[in-house]
Amino acid sequence: MPLAIRIFFSLLMLWAAGAAAAEKSILVYGDSLSAAYGIAQSRGWVALLGDRVKRERPDYSVANASVSGETSAGGVARIEATLARFHPTVLIVELGANDGLRGQPVGQMKINLGVIIEQARRSGARVLLVGMKLPPNYGNEYTGSFERAFGELAKQHHVALVPFMLEGFAEKREYFQADHMHPTADAQPLILDRVWQGLKPLLK
């Protein structure tokens, strides 16, 4: 085979490999906790994740499809179109907090999150489920059922789990905005570290 043709095919293979690598993506699918509510977008944990991925796993990209106020039902309503648009390699599901704060049935939340997980897996995406806890004033029975739901879903659907995204600082007032619900910019690196522990093994 002439040298020029060999070089051409070598370049073509390198281009194809680069294109395939560029197609690998992480999509965050959550609510206001992932939409940088009340702070600059560039300081939110998803933006910080993008920075870390560029440094440590440049073969991946990061996109954010989070919507403030989103419930698990809202997530079900838009998951098909979102998967079709982004074609993620890894989907981070961070939903359920608004269901809990509104006192909605935990059983229905589990059904909704299960639908999202299964649609993502059918599309070929690996899934990381991010759990949440509720304040104690919602009652022990409800808060316990809510907290256990995420672990039960991860086990049922065989997906990775971050049990509680606010682990380590949930009781520290200084890490929350005036509404006592949304983390400040200073808390975002702590969230990233928690999520990264569950995400890193999925970046095969």
Image (cartoon, rainbow, N blue to C red):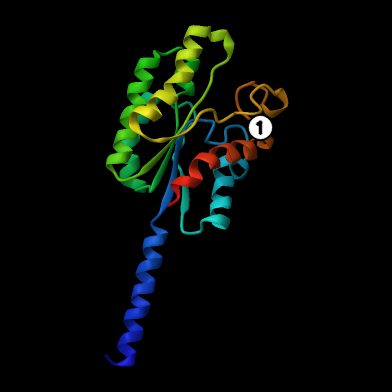
Whether residue 127 is situated above or below residue 70 in the rendered picture: below
Provide residue 70's location: percent of width, then percent of height: 44, 27
> Is any atom of residue 57 visible in this view?
yes
85 horizontally vs 56: left or right: left
> Is any atom of residue 74 visible in this view?
no
Q: Nearer the viewer, residue 110 or 41?
A: 110
Residue at 41% from the left image edge and 13% from the top image edge? 104
Residue at 66% from the left image edge and 34% from the top image edge? 187
Q: Nearer the viewer, residue 148 or 51?
A: 148
Image quarter hosting the N terminus: bottom left
**How many labels were placed on the picture?**
1
Residue at 38% from the left image edge and 20% from the top image edge? 109
Whether residue 149 is situated above or below residue 157 in the rendered picture: above
Q: Quadrant of residue 90?
A: top left
Q: Residues within 10 Å of mark 1 (few under 14, many from 20)?
A: many
**Mark 1 secondary-structure assignment:** loop
Provide residue 86's location: percent of width, then percent of height: 37, 47
40 horizontally vs 98: left or right: right
Residue at 54% from the left image edge and 17% from the top image edge? 134
Q: Quadrant of residue 24?
A: bottom left
Whether residue 67 is situated above or below residue 102 in the rendered picture: below
The residue where tag 1 is placed is: 184
Q: Nearer the viewer, residue 204 or 93?
A: 204
Residue type (three-letter) at the residue carrying disc 1: Thr
Q: Quadrant of residue 120?
A: top left
200 horizontally vs 119: left or right: right
Provide residue 125's location: percent of width, then percent of height: 35, 44
